[in-house]
Image (tube, grey):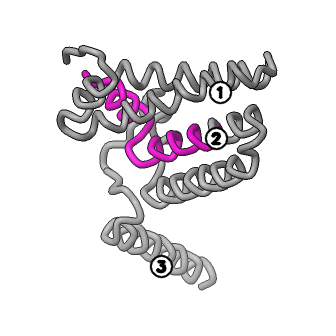
Amino acid sequence: MAATAQAAAAQASDTAKHWWGRAKVATGLAEEIDEEAPNSSLLSSFNEATTLSKTQRVYGFGICVGCAICFGFLSTLFVVMPTKFAVLFTFSQMFAIASTFFLTGPWTQLKNMMKKGRGIAALIYFGSMVLVLFCAIKLHSAILTLLAMIVQLGALAFYCASFIPFAQQMMARAIGVEMSF
């Protein structure tokens, strides 16, 4: 009698888990799982372990944006101290970029950043962020840090302009540089 009750309880629990899983899929809180064909390869196991749900992506995005805003706000408190300002502002920018990785995935975002017209600006932007941190932390040079910061902001503006049709060409003409894309 007790075994029958335990079996019935186990079956009810499995049924409840099944329907709860279906409800999650229907509301978009979980990805649909193909129960008939389990993947046991190493690559699929790695992909499953590193894939984030929509909820996790939104949380990651929110946390990174929050950190970007905090570091950006803190950087404004140190405007008179160029090296501290540059380090905090650069960390703010790094968190802002990291937040976009959560929305589209890092590989997709990097591919989008390296598209024609954006790649050079993105590489200069990343390089200038490294240069800002190097000048501020290792060299302790306020002048070099400010110069690298100007390059960083220019590369950021040029990268953002790549999303607006003809904006990069207009910016290049405004500063007197001839470009062909």
Q: CA distance from mark 2 to mark 3?
A: 55 Å
> What segment carries the magenta color?
91-117
Quadrant of the rendering where the C terminus is positioned: top left
For label 2, the crowd category at 10 Å Cα-Cα, with few meaning under 14, some 14 to 19 and many 20 or more, is many
Q: Position of residue 20 (x, y in %)?
A: 43, 73
Q: Earlier in the sequence, mark 1 or mark 3?
A: 3
Q: Earlier in the sequence, mark 2 or mark 3?
A: 3
Q: Position of residue 169 (x, y in %)?
A: 22, 27
Residue 25 appears left or right of 4: left
Between 44 and 143, the one lying in front of the other is 143
Q: Secondary structure at mark 1?
A: helix
Residue 158: quarter of image: top left
- What residue is disc 2 on? 89
Residue 153 appears left or right of 21: right
- What residue is disc 1 on? 146
Residue 104: quarter of image: top left
Q: Is residue 40 visible?
A: no
The amino acid on which the numbered mark 1 sits, given as a three-letter code, is Leu
Q: CA distance from mark 1 to mark 3?
A: 66 Å
Q: Position of residue 55 (x, y in %)?
A: 47, 61
Residue 25: in magenta span: no
Quadrant of the rendering where the N terminus is positioned: bottom right
Say if 137 sits above or below 38 in the image: above
- Residue visible at 49% across and 25% down? 125
Q: Main secondary structure of the magenta part?
A: helix
The amino acid on which the numbered mark 3 sits, given as a three-letter code, is Ala
Say if 59 sits above or below 161 in the image: below
- What residue is disc 3 on? 12
- Residue visible at 64% across and 41% down? 89
Q: Position of residue 155 (x, y in %)?
A: 44, 27
Residue 35 appears left or right of 124: left
